[in-house]
Amino acid sequence: MRDRKQRLHLIYAVPYAEKFRMLTGKGVPLYRKYWRYSIPWLKPVPAPQSITYNILKTLSKSYEVLLYHVDEKQSLKLGNNDIVLGHFWPDMRTKENSNNNWTRYDPEQITNAAILNYPYDKRIFVMTPFNHSTEQSGWAIPLMKQAHHYIGICGDYWVDTLDQSAYAFLQGKMSHLNMGIDIRHYPKVKTGFSKAGKRKFLYIGRISKEKNIDMLEAIAASNKNFYGGYIGKGVIKGWHQISSSAVLTSKFMSKLALEYDFFINASNYDAQATTVLEAMSWGFVVACTPQSGYVEESIFRLSTNNVEHNIKIIELMNSLDENELQAIVHQYQILLRKKYTWEKFTDKLIKILSNEFIQTN
């Protein structure tokens, strides 16, 4: 008789979850057990659903995985060998402003309820994108303190400076995962760069407080030769809006790559911007803040608040010759294969769930 696999309750982003629930009414959504056959995944799978997809793909080989959408309300009855791997969720009724800040958690959401019902239980692992902003996730601090183990998906910067933050209490109970990317789905489309002094900058993302849009506007206002284009809903003063949204297919990005040379991200509170990984994979040279989630030497480092420094970086990037820029792109390709793969992500996650790895930091 085959041994039964250990059961894993995965609570994360499920594509089309609301449509599934409309079909089943009060019944169990098809994706709970039949996620392998019922979910029409996009290609490439965008974040955060890419996290769900790659966890399912790999961990289902070792675990019996039951899948829940991140906002589902339920009280789990855990067996001795069950494991919960879940995302926190706020009480949506407490949304305070357009930046999606909340003031408390939803006690009925599955992950939250599991922590409240089984405080400090070794079977429960919380996993979310992580940075030091209390505006974004301060509401979850009481749950973080009651969780046995917290897994932060974030850049090295947020771990290296953990002891200087409001989340210093996580030291000794937090593990760190870097985001992954499947570079086969983000092929290198940029083959050459514009002439020095004529290069353009690209931003893709939300127009929100944590993205530090004020800095992007200040850069444009302080340099008459600067040209920036963006994809996002809203206004960035001094920048050209390419579109409010777009499906970032290889064909679409190939056209953008003919006009734009550099990708820029000035975030002040960003766990680990996946657009940076995608831009590197496409062949753009990247400039971003450490608070965007990346501190690699091959990435041009911006400041969150020093416009003069950032202008100097932009002028430097605009002065480099073609060979220097291509050498940087080559470094990105190596970096993506060594550090930011889904294999790295899931291999480390399996060790964490097996209690073989705890980052004490």
Image (tube, rainbow, N blue to C red):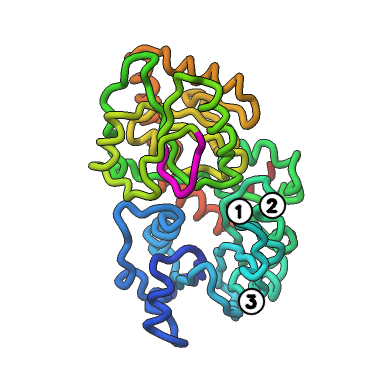
Check residue 56 in the rendering and tell me which mark sits there, or answer none. none
The numbered mark, 2 or 1, whose residue comes first in the sequence reads 1
Q: Residues within 10 Å of mark 1 (few under 14, many from 20)?
A: few
Q: Which residue matches tag 2?
A: 135
Q: SS at mark 2? A: helix
Side of 185 relative to 213 (left or right): left
Most extreme residue toward the left, as rendered?
Answer: 251
Say which quadrant the C terminus sits in. top right
Indicate the quadrant where residue 58 lies: bottom left
Label whose residue precedes the other's in the sequence (2 or 3):
3
Q: Is residue 274 above or below residue 94?
A: above
At 25% from the left and 36% from the top, the residue drawn is 255
Which stretch did the figure color magenta? 230-237
Decide if residue 213 is on the left or right side of residue 360. left
Residue 253 lies in quadrant: top left
Give x and y (percent) for residue 61.
38, 63
Q: Residues within 10 Å of mark 2 (few under 14, many from 20)?
A: some
In front: label 2 or label 1:
1
Nearer mark to the viewer, of 2 and 3: 2
- The answer to which image quadrant residue 39 occupies is bottom left
Verify CB contact (< 8 Å) between mark 2 and mark 1: yes
Mark 3 Cα within 10 Å, few/some/many (few <14, many 20+)? Answer: some
